[in-house]
Amino acid sequence: MRTGVVRLARALPKMLDPPLQQHSFGGHRPKLAVTCADIPGRYIDLLKQNCDVTVCQGTSRADILRTITGAEGILWLTGDRLDAEALDAAGQQLKVVSTMTSGMDYVDAGEFTKRGIALGHTPKVVNDPVADIAIGLMLAAARRFHEGRLKIATGEWEMRPQWMLGQDVPGSTVGIVGFGGIGQTILKRLKGFDIGRCLYTGRSRKPEADLVGASYVDLATLLRESDFVFIACPLTGETARMFNRETLALMKRSSVLINVARGGIVDQPALVEALREGTIFAAGLDVMTPEPLDTNDPLLSLPNCVVVPHLGTATQQSLLDMFAITANNVLSVLAGGPLVAPYQKG
């Protein structure tokens, strides 16, 4: 899948160059809105060759709503709520919106269906970078990177055999909550670490899991038996605060929790309590609630919690890949074609 996505991304300049006519708008210049200015200027310039483009220069919701007024297509590049209010602000001429995310918990998909507006997003392209950061957080939390750095800073570096022992990855049982594209890619990465077995849970058993030797179990079994637990499922009504005081208590005291999905899947105060009391060994978080996290949040005071600021897709190539798919979603629909990556509510 990655090869196809990269090929699509690299084709973006050709797709937007004036000589190429497969995106013919019949002499009409579609009105596009881009909700964030933090995109390489050369890509915006390419869009402007065939479209009238308005780029939001502010960061507030009011700025975004002003920018999208009158747009026929919107490249929604923020995590701001995409709902009836936003669609009303855009107007009845709006035909298509594409987000630059895989997760769509901030989108009211029902409003799009009701209004007949096409909705795209950027799945699959996020699998590799998010899986990479998940593995990084696993190692950092299991081997106590953050705590070790604090020991150096406070002059507490000790020279003895049993100091700062961490958890072993080889031979371990790994549990993955949500075995979609990201979960499956995480397991691909883990194969090189010689793990003992992989458990997964979700709404249903997946044929892909059978092919790679992952075993389908319920959540309670996964939590009781896993040494490492990865959260890689969407945030929904069913998964909100799935990890709470009761479920965290099922985990091994030696276990490590890694969350690369959404902060709302975890009851954060309960996680802080579990880390402080040693209910679990450590946690690695790329997502939290709220984002940005308050500088006085108790998560930041925990030596056994590795926190990074939602960096899952923050690589140079991932940005370009995601922007390319977002743009192609919108341009294809405005030219009378289908979405390249349609959002289909699971």
Image (tube, rainbow, N blue to C red):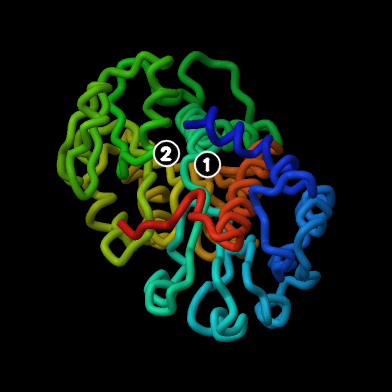
Indicate the position of residue 114 as horizontal and vertical percent values: 38, 78
Q: Position of residue 199 (x, y in %)?
A: 23, 32
303 or 345, which lies in front? 345
Kind of residue at badge 2: Ile
What is the number of the mark on residue 182? 2
> Horizontal placement of 309 versus 36: left or right?
left
Establish if 345 lies above or below 87.
above
Residue 149, above or below 302: above
* Image quadrant in which you'd find residue 74: bottom right
Across and down, in percent, residue 241 comes to 33, 61
**Quick check: 84 left or right of 246?**
right
Task: Residue 21: give x, y in percent of width and height.
Answer: 70, 48
Instruction: Categorize mark 2 by other alpha carbons within 10 Å: few (<14), some (14-19), many (20+).
Output: many
| Position of residue 50 in the picture relative to residue 329 (left or right) | right
Residue at 67% across, 61% down:
25
Q: Quadrant of the C terminus?
A: bottom left
**Residue nearer the viewer, 315 or 37:** 37
| Mark 1, other Cα within 10 Å: few <14 / some 14–19 / many ≥20 | many
Q: Secondary structure at mark 2?
A: helix
Tags 1 and 2 in contact by the CB under 8 Å rule?
Answer: yes
Residue located beneath label 1 in the image: 126
Quarter assignment of residue 212: top left
Badge 1 or badge 2: first in the primary sequence: 1
Count numbered badges in the picture: 2
Q: Amino acid at mark 1?
A: Val
Label 1 sits on a secondary structure element that is: loop
